[in-house]
Amino acid sequence: MAVLLTNSVATNGINKTVQMLNQNVSSLDAIESGIRLVESDPEAVWVGYGGHPNLLGTVELDAGIMDGLTLNAGAVGALSGYLHPISVARNVMEKLPHVFLAGNGAAKFAKDCNAESGDNLTMRTCKDWNDWLNNNRNWPDVSLIRLSMLTANNKTAKGTTIFLAQDNDGNFSAGSSSSGWSFKYPGRLGDSPVIGSGIYADNRYGAAACTGMGELTLRSNTARSVILYLKMNMTLKEACYE
Ligand code: ASP
């Protein structure tokens, strides 16, 4: 029996992913399709189109995908101007000898792949950005360092969609897509696309993904650590607690 686990941000992509898993589609294809739907949802203000911008008003997207059968993985970070970072990440995995591309290089690769381009900033998120700056005074004559410290709280330091699936062939996959912290420092990479921190999948043990303040999971390599503890025969509860 196929299994799907997501977080609450994933609502718009769940039905499609379940349908595909039930039709014996691979977990990689099923989670990519589901995540694309979340990326297109303007109500998901931490993912793709309609995701919150960075401090300078640019939407920079992170996404990663991992195949638990082969341990292949692909990721993009701080990607601007493209609508489906999860598919660009999948292409990194399948077309390049690399795992992770960031910034201008990721955008160049997205163009080489004919990925769908577009402006991810919406009127709503532009207003959210303006309101936040107005509430935090003196914009634009301020240091971004001080402003970025103000984003480190539970109202802005959150938001990602994560999908973990096992298909009818028993193969696990993990995927994530995120605009990262709202109003983050330009160029900031979160944990979501970092293989081992934000996501991990290994058919022999399972799959894991993280949400929340990514700086913590970046320091602890949390997703891979949980899988490693499972490998060391801890129970799931013990592995997650550890
Ligand atoms: N982990 C994400 C980040 O730090 C945010 C989240 O998933 O809540 O960018």
Image (cartoon, rainbow, N blue to C red):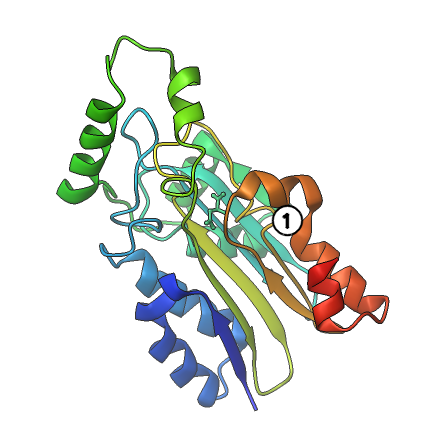
Image side of residue 137 versus residue 63, left or right = left
Image side of residue 202 versus residue 172, left or right = right
Quick check: can you spot residue 67?
no
Find disc 1 in the rendering and name its residue.
197
Q: Position of residue 198 (x, y in %)?
A: 58, 51
Q: Amino acid at mark 1?
A: Ser
> Closer to the camera, 215 or 25?
215
Q: Secondary structure at mark 1?
A: loop
Image side of residue 31 versus residue 68, left or right = left
Q: Is residue 14 above or below residue 92?
A: below
Total number of numbered labels?
A: 1
Disc 1 residue crowd, few under 14, some 14–19, many 20+, Cα 10 Å = many
- For the point 77% across and 73% down, the residue is 235
Q: Position of residue 144 (x, y in %)?
A: 38, 17
Q: Is residue 208 above or below residue 140?
A: below
> Closer to the camera, 116 or 79?
79
- For the point 48% across and 82% down, the residue is 25
Q: Position of residue 242 (x, y in %)?
A: 75, 57
Q: Is residue 96 above or below residue 229?
A: above
> Closer to the camera, 212 or 177?
212
